[in-house]
Image (spheres, helix red, strand yellow):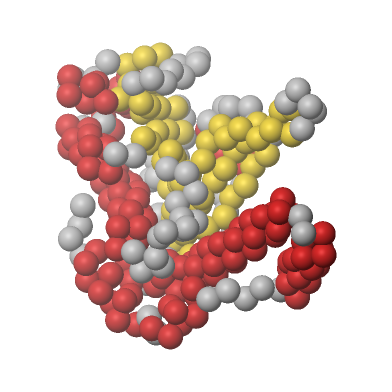
Amino acid sequence: MDNNFEEIYKKIISELNAEDIEQSKKIKLESKEIAIIVVLFVISLFTCSLPIFLAVLLIMYITIISKKTRNKNKFFKQNVMTKMVKYYNDSFEYNANMGIGSAEYSQIWKEHYDRYYAEDDIKGILANNYSFEMSNVKAQIVSKDSKEKEVLRDIFSGIFAKINLPVDFKSELYICEKSRSIKDQEKIRMDSSEFEKHFKVYGQNKMTAFQLLTLDIMQMLIEYKEQSKIEFEICIKNDKLYIRFFIGDVFELGMAENTTNHDVIQKHYYILNFIVKLSEKLSNIIKEMQ
């Protein structure tokens, strides 16, 4: 991993206005929300009902926390994430309202889902002149409970990335966690016992697997997994490299997380950096193969 994150972080912090950061923490309730709270509060006063009074307090608390979190997230995306992406590479672009479409995701990870969401898109051109794109993705199954109430279950929630490669291999290669298996694909044994402690490889062409997964690449995957503690899967299909990180909605800050939290910003940086470095290394290997 590169060491220039600290330089990027210092630059982001130095350019953020302290007043803007404080403003992002303030609560701006809409008139409709204020009216509902006032009405419920008045009812509780006239009825002297403890349950209603407690309900009002709970509604006020949830509303305030929700508003505070939304304000923080908006500031984080518009100011912190936009700067981090630009300072990493000024040709990269971040768009909080866009994402990779469901069609491409479905072609790679053949899993049934009912709902698909994608946002927080980062895209650009790499040093080898090939394009890449990554988005925050959520794929969900919808079911019903005993009371016919809708229940959502995440099949996947995290980062999904796609990168163009110099050659169309006309085959598929999957690098997965030990607990996973890929249907209709042959398991391929690799030369590294250390690598096989962490990953399983499936594909249609053993030669392609051995050519692409050099000792260098395998070591890079092991190190990233051990350092990041993030589960991830890779697919090389035809002329594209796909990666998905099981990390949840990483672009949404938690209630207790600050917009300038060093570790939170660093986590985003390391994912972006890993995608870029891995794709560049693989592209160089592919060029040597030609």
**On screen, residue 281 above or below 257:** above
- 265 vs 30, nearest the viewer: 30
Residue nearest the viewer, comparing 109 with 8: 8
> Where is residue 240 drawn, in percent x and y?
45, 41
Confirm whether residue 286 shows in the render: no
Say which quarter of the image contains residue 213: top left
What residue sits 40% from the left and 54% below the top?
A: 130
Q: Residue at x 34, y 50 (%)?
A: 271
Q: Position of residue 14 (x, y in %)?
A: 30, 81
Whether 112 is drawn above or below 61: the answer is above
Give the quadrant of residue 154: top right
Identify the image quadrant of residue 125: bottom left
Is 252 displayed left or right of 260 in the figure? right
Q: Nearer the viewer, residue 55 or 143?
A: 55
Depth order, front residue of 17/39: 39
Residue 124: give x, y in percent of width and height. Answer: 44, 61
In the image, residue 181 above or below residue 98: above
- Residue 71 position (above or below residue 16): above
Tell me what residue is drawn at x 63 percent, y 27 percent. Answer: 112
